[in-house]
Protein backbone atom coordinates (compact mmCIF):
# COMPACT_ATOMS: atom_id res chain seq x y z
CA UNK A 1 0.00 0.00 0.00
CA UNK A 2 1.33 3.39 -0.92
CA UNK A 3 1.06 6.15 1.63
CA UNK A 4 0.59 9.89 1.39
CA UNK A 5 2.91 12.72 2.41
CA UNK A 6 0.86 15.77 3.27
CA UNK A 7 1.39 19.50 3.32
CA UNK A 8 2.32 20.40 6.92
CA UNK A 9 -0.20 23.24 6.77
CA UNK A 10 -3.07 20.79 6.23
CA UNK A 11 -2.31 18.29 9.02
CA UNK A 12 -5.05 17.83 11.62
CA UNK A 13 -4.24 18.33 15.31
CA UNK A 14 -4.11 14.55 15.76
CA UNK A 15 -1.73 14.13 12.79
CA UNK A 16 0.59 16.79 14.18
CA UNK A 17 0.58 15.11 17.60
CA UNK A 18 1.37 11.69 16.18
CA UNK A 19 4.19 12.98 13.95
CA UNK A 20 5.82 14.81 16.89
CA UNK A 21 5.38 11.83 19.21
CA UNK A 22 6.98 9.46 16.70
CA UNK A 23 9.94 11.82 16.20
CA UNK A 24 10.50 12.09 19.94
CA UNK A 25 10.39 8.31 20.27
CA UNK A 26 12.90 7.80 17.42
CA UNK A 27 15.12 10.32 19.22
CA UNK A 28 14.66 8.55 22.59
CA UNK A 29 15.69 5.24 21.00
CA UNK A 30 18.95 6.78 19.81
CA UNK A 31 18.07 6.23 16.14
CA UNK A 32 17.65 9.91 15.38
CA UNK A 33 21.24 10.76 16.26
CA UNK A 34 22.42 8.08 13.82
CA UNK A 35 20.73 10.07 11.05
CA UNK A 36 22.52 13.21 12.22
CA UNK A 37 25.86 11.36 12.29
CA UNK A 38 25.31 9.96 8.83
CA UNK A 39 24.50 13.37 7.35
CA UNK A 40 27.66 14.82 8.93
CA UNK A 41 29.69 11.93 7.49
CA UNK A 42 28.36 12.53 3.96
CA UNK A 43 28.81 16.29 4.00
CA UNK A 44 31.93 16.38 1.83
CA UNK A 45 32.14 19.50 -0.32
CA UNK A 46 33.56 19.48 -3.83
CA UNK A 47 36.77 21.09 -2.58
CA UNK A 48 37.62 17.71 -1.08
CA UNK A 49 38.72 15.18 -3.65
CA UNK A 50 36.40 12.44 -2.56
CA UNK A 51 33.32 10.96 -4.18
CA UNK A 52 30.44 13.38 -3.57
CA UNK A 53 27.10 11.73 -2.94
CA UNK A 54 24.78 13.83 -0.77
CA UNK A 55 25.58 17.39 -1.82
CA UNK A 56 27.13 19.33 -4.71
CA UNK A 57 26.46 16.33 -6.93
CA UNK A 58 23.78 14.83 -9.19
CA UNK A 59 22.83 12.36 -6.46
CA UNK A 60 21.75 15.19 -4.13
CA UNK A 61 18.14 14.27 -4.95
CA UNK A 62 18.25 10.44 -4.76
CA UNK A 63 20.56 10.55 -1.70
CA UNK A 64 18.12 12.67 0.29
CA UNK A 65 15.15 10.69 -1.06
CA UNK A 66 16.59 7.50 0.36
CA UNK A 67 17.63 9.29 3.58
CA UNK A 68 14.04 10.50 4.09
CA UNK A 69 12.67 7.02 3.37
CA UNK A 70 14.93 5.60 6.11
CA UNK A 71 13.74 8.18 8.66
CA UNK A 72 10.14 7.63 7.58
CA UNK A 73 10.56 3.88 8.10
CA UNK A 74 11.88 4.55 11.62
CA UNK A 75 8.86 6.79 12.34
CA UNK A 76 6.45 4.21 10.93
CA UNK A 77 7.94 1.48 13.14
CA UNK A 78 6.75 3.65 16.05
CA UNK A 79 3.39 4.63 14.51
CA UNK A 80 2.39 3.20 11.13
CA UNK A 81 0.02 6.11 10.46
CA UNK A 82 2.85 8.64 10.36
CA UNK A 83 4.47 9.99 7.18
CA UNK A 84 6.87 12.91 6.69
CA UNK A 85 4.93 16.10 5.95
CA UNK A 86 6.32 18.75 3.62
CA UNK A 87 6.80 22.46 4.16
CA UNK A 88 5.76 24.49 1.12
CA UNK A 89 7.88 27.58 1.76
CA UNK A 90 6.47 29.26 -1.36
CA UNK A 91 3.12 29.47 0.51
CA UNK A 92 3.84 29.29 4.23
CA UNK A 93 6.30 32.17 4.45
CA UNK A 94 5.83 33.80 7.84
CA UNK A 95 7.64 33.07 11.09
CA UNK A 96 4.40 31.90 12.72
CA UNK A 97 2.77 29.89 9.90
CA UNK A 98 3.06 26.13 9.43
CA UNK A 99 5.27 24.34 10.41
CA UNK A 100 6.33 26.76 13.20
CA UNK A 101 3.35 26.29 15.50
CA UNK A 102 3.73 25.21 19.14
CA UNK A 103 2.08 21.85 18.37
CA UNK A 104 4.38 21.02 15.46
CA UNK A 105 7.98 22.29 15.26
CA UNK A 106 7.83 25.30 17.61
CA UNK A 107 8.99 28.77 16.63
CA UNK A 108 12.01 30.97 16.12
CA UNK A 109 14.98 31.05 18.48
CA UNK A 110 15.24 33.81 21.07
CA UNK A 111 17.34 36.84 20.26
CA UNK A 112 20.23 36.37 22.70
CA UNK A 113 21.48 32.89 21.77
CA UNK A 114 18.93 31.77 19.12
CA UNK A 115 17.72 29.01 21.42
CA UNK A 116 14.28 27.65 20.45
CA UNK A 117 12.02 28.16 23.49
CA UNK A 118 8.64 26.94 22.20
CA UNK A 119 7.23 23.66 20.96
CA UNK A 120 8.17 20.01 21.52
CA UNK A 121 11.83 20.44 20.52
CA UNK A 122 12.67 23.24 22.94
CA UNK A 123 15.62 22.17 25.09
CA UNK A 124 13.91 22.77 28.42
CA UNK A 125 11.13 20.32 27.54
CA UNK A 126 13.83 17.70 28.03
CA UNK A 127 13.22 15.53 24.93
CA UNK A 128 15.51 17.12 22.37
CA UNK A 129 19.12 17.39 23.49
CA UNK A 130 21.53 17.80 20.62
CA UNK A 131 24.28 15.20 20.85
CA UNK A 132 25.81 15.05 17.39
CA UNK A 133 26.92 18.46 16.27
CA UNK A 134 29.68 20.51 14.76
CA UNK A 135 29.37 23.06 17.61
CA UNK A 136 28.80 22.26 21.26
CA UNK A 137 25.35 23.74 21.84
CA UNK A 138 23.05 21.14 23.38
CA UNK A 139 19.94 23.14 22.46
CA UNK A 140 18.18 23.61 19.11
CA UNK A 141 18.78 27.02 17.51
CA UNK A 142 16.97 29.03 14.80
CA UNK A 143 17.42 32.54 13.46
CA UNK A 144 14.57 33.11 10.99
CA UNK A 145 15.38 35.49 8.16
CA UNK A 146 18.87 36.21 9.55
CA UNK A 147 18.07 39.75 10.85
CA UNK A 148 21.75 40.78 10.87
CA UNK A 149 21.98 40.23 7.10
CA UNK A 150 18.37 39.70 6.03
CA UNK A 151 17.55 36.96 3.57
CA UNK A 152 14.10 36.04 2.19
CA UNK A 153 12.69 32.61 1.53
CA UNK A 154 12.86 31.63 -2.14
CA UNK A 155 9.71 32.40 -4.11
CA UNK A 156 7.51 30.47 -6.51
CA UNK A 157 9.33 32.08 -9.41
CA UNK A 158 12.73 31.02 -8.00
CA UNK A 159 11.42 27.47 -7.95
CA UNK A 160 9.93 27.83 -11.43
CA UNK A 161 13.36 28.89 -12.72
CA UNK A 162 14.70 25.49 -11.61
CA UNK A 163 11.68 23.43 -12.70
CA UNK A 164 11.67 24.73 -16.25
CA UNK A 165 15.22 23.53 -16.95
CA UNK A 166 14.71 20.37 -19.05
CA UNK A 167 18.15 18.87 -18.28
CA UNK A 168 18.69 17.07 -14.96
CA UNK A 169 22.35 18.01 -14.47
CA UNK A 170 25.42 18.91 -16.53
CA UNK A 171 29.19 18.43 -16.41
CA UNK A 172 31.16 18.99 -14.20
CA UNK A 173 28.23 17.86 -12.04
CA UNK A 174 29.23 19.95 -9.01
CA UNK A 175 28.39 23.20 -7.20
CA UNK A 176 29.70 25.37 -10.05
CA UNK A 177 27.28 24.36 -12.81
CA UNK A 178 24.90 27.12 -13.87
CA UNK A 179 22.62 24.91 -15.94
CA UNK A 180 20.58 21.86 -15.00
CA UNK A 181 17.63 21.29 -12.70
CA UNK A 182 19.66 19.70 -9.88
CA UNK A 183 21.94 22.61 -9.01
CA UNK A 184 19.26 25.21 -9.70
CA UNK A 185 17.21 23.41 -7.07
CA UNK A 186 20.09 22.54 -4.70
CA UNK A 187 21.08 26.17 -4.98
CA UNK A 188 24.84 26.68 -5.24
CA UNK A 189 25.96 29.72 -7.11
CA UNK A 190 29.12 31.68 -7.59
CA UNK A 191 27.34 35.00 -7.02
CA UNK A 192 27.92 37.12 -3.94
CA UNK A 193 25.57 38.28 -1.23
CA UNK A 194 22.04 37.00 -0.87
CA UNK A 195 21.76 35.84 -4.50
CA UNK A 196 24.48 33.27 -3.85
CA UNK A 197 21.99 31.02 -2.05
CA UNK A 198 19.09 29.70 -4.05
CA UNK A 199 16.08 27.46 -3.44
CA UNK A 200 17.16 24.51 -1.21
CA UNK A 201 20.27 26.24 0.15
CA UNK A 202 18.45 29.51 0.70
CA UNK A 203 15.85 27.82 2.92
CA UNK A 204 18.63 26.38 5.12
CA UNK A 205 20.04 29.94 5.40
CA UNK A 206 16.64 31.48 6.18
CA UNK A 207 15.95 29.07 9.07
CA UNK A 208 19.49 29.55 10.33
CA UNK A 209 20.89 28.12 13.57
CA UNK A 210 21.17 24.34 13.48
CA UNK A 211 19.99 24.28 9.84
CA UNK A 212 23.18 25.96 8.63
CA UNK A 213 25.74 23.20 8.61
CA UNK A 214 26.46 19.51 8.31
CA UNK A 215 24.37 18.80 11.43
CA UNK A 216 21.21 20.42 9.99
CA UNK A 217 19.32 17.16 10.60
CA UNK A 218 19.18 18.23 14.29
CA UNK A 219 16.31 20.54 13.36
CA UNK A 220 13.28 18.38 12.45
CA UNK A 221 12.34 20.95 9.80
CA UNK A 222 15.16 19.36 7.79
CA UNK A 223 12.76 16.51 6.86
CA UNK A 224 9.85 18.81 5.98
CA UNK A 225 12.12 20.95 3.83
CA UNK A 226 13.63 17.96 2.05
CA UNK A 227 10.20 16.39 1.48
CA UNK A 228 9.24 19.55 -0.41
CA UNK A 229 12.52 19.37 -2.38
CA UNK A 230 11.76 15.72 -3.14
CA UNK A 231 8.31 16.74 -4.40
CA UNK A 232 9.99 19.16 -6.84
CA UNK A 233 11.88 16.24 -8.39
CA UNK A 234 8.52 14.54 -9.09
CA UNK A 235 7.08 17.77 -10.50
CA UNK A 236 10.11 18.15 -12.76
CA UNK A 237 9.76 14.55 -14.02
CA UNK A 238 6.07 15.12 -14.80
CA UNK A 239 6.81 18.30 -16.67
CA UNK A 240 9.72 16.91 -18.71
CA UNK A 241 8.40 13.47 -19.70
CA UNK A 242 11.21 11.05 -20.37
CA UNK A 243 13.91 13.27 -18.84
CA UNK A 244 16.18 11.16 -16.66
CA UNK A 245 18.82 11.34 -13.98
CA UNK A 246 22.21 12.28 -15.42
CA UNK A 247 24.96 11.29 -15.92
CA UNK A 248 23.70 8.05 -17.46
CA UNK A 249 27.24 6.64 -17.47
CA UNK A 250 30.32 7.37 -15.30
CA UNK A 251 32.81 9.86 -16.76
CA UNK A 252 35.90 8.33 -18.41
CA UNK A 253 39.11 7.89 -16.36
CA UNK A 254 40.65 10.97 -18.01
CA UNK A 255 37.77 13.15 -16.79
CA UNK A 256 38.46 15.16 -13.61
CA UNK A 257 35.08 13.97 -12.32
CA UNK A 258 35.98 10.28 -12.70
CA UNK A 259 35.01 8.52 -9.45
CA UNK A 260 33.92 11.85 -7.96
CA UNK A 261 30.17 11.27 -8.20
CA UNK A 262 27.51 8.63 -8.85
CA UNK A 263 26.17 7.83 -12.33
CA UNK A 264 22.65 6.49 -12.98
CA UNK A 265 23.44 2.80 -12.53
CA UNK A 266 26.14 3.05 -9.85
CA UNK A 267 25.57 2.27 -6.19
CA UNK A 268 24.71 5.26 -4.06
CA UNK A 269 26.72 4.98 -0.81
CA UNK A 270 26.02 3.97 1.88
CA UNK A 271 23.10 2.04 0.40
CA UNK A 272 22.83 -0.87 -2.00
CA UNK A 273 20.66 1.15 -4.37
CA UNK A 274 21.21 3.16 -7.58
CA UNK A 275 19.78 6.54 -8.63
CA UNK A 276 17.97 4.64 -11.39
CA UNK A 277 16.12 2.61 -8.75
CA UNK A 278 15.13 5.77 -6.86
CA UNK A 279 13.72 7.73 -9.81
CA UNK A 280 10.25 6.24 -9.42
CA UNK A 281 8.80 5.98 -5.91
CA UNK A 282 5.14 5.89 -6.98
CA UNK A 283 4.88 2.40 -5.49
CA UNK A 284 5.92 3.69 -2.05
CA UNK A 285 4.37 7.12 -1.50
CA UNK A 286 2.73 10.06 -3.19
CA UNK A 287 2.33 13.73 -2.32
CA UNK A 288 -1.01 15.32 -1.55
CU1 LIG B 1 21.84 17.13 3.14
CU1 LIG C 1 19.32 20.35 2.75
Image (tube, rainbow, N blue to C red):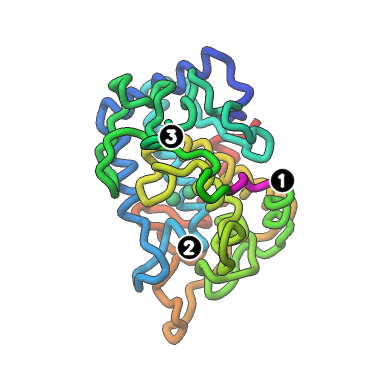
Any part of residue 10 in sight: yes
Q: How far apart, in angstroms, are the residues tagged by discs 1 and 2?
A: 23 Å
Principal SS element in the magenta part? loop
Give the residue at mark 3. Answer: 111
Q: In the drawing, what numbered circle is on residue 267?
A: none
Q: In the figure, 238 relative to 118: above or below?
A: below
Q: How far apart, in angstroms, are the residues tagged by discs 3 and 2?
A: 32 Å
The answer to whether residue 276 is left or right of residue 142 is right
**Residue at x 49% of width, y 19% of height:** 102
**Residue at x 65% of width, y 68% of height:** 179
Give the residue at mark 1. Answer: 156
Residue 173 percent location from the top left of the image: 53, 70
Quadrant where the C terminus lies? top right
Q: Residues within 10 Å of mark 2 (few under 14, many from 20)?
A: many
> Which residue is farthest bottom?
254
Residue 180 percent location from the top left of the image: 64, 65
Any part of residue 2 in sight: no
Amino acid sequence: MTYVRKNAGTLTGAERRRFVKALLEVKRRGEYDEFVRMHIAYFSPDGEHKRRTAHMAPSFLPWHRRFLLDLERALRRVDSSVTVPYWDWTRDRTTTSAPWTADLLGGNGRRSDHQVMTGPFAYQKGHWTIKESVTDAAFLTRDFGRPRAPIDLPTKSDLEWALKDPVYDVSPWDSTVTRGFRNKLEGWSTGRGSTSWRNHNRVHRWVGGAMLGAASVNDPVFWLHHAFIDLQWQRWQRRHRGARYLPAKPPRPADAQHNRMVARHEKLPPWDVTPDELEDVSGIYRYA
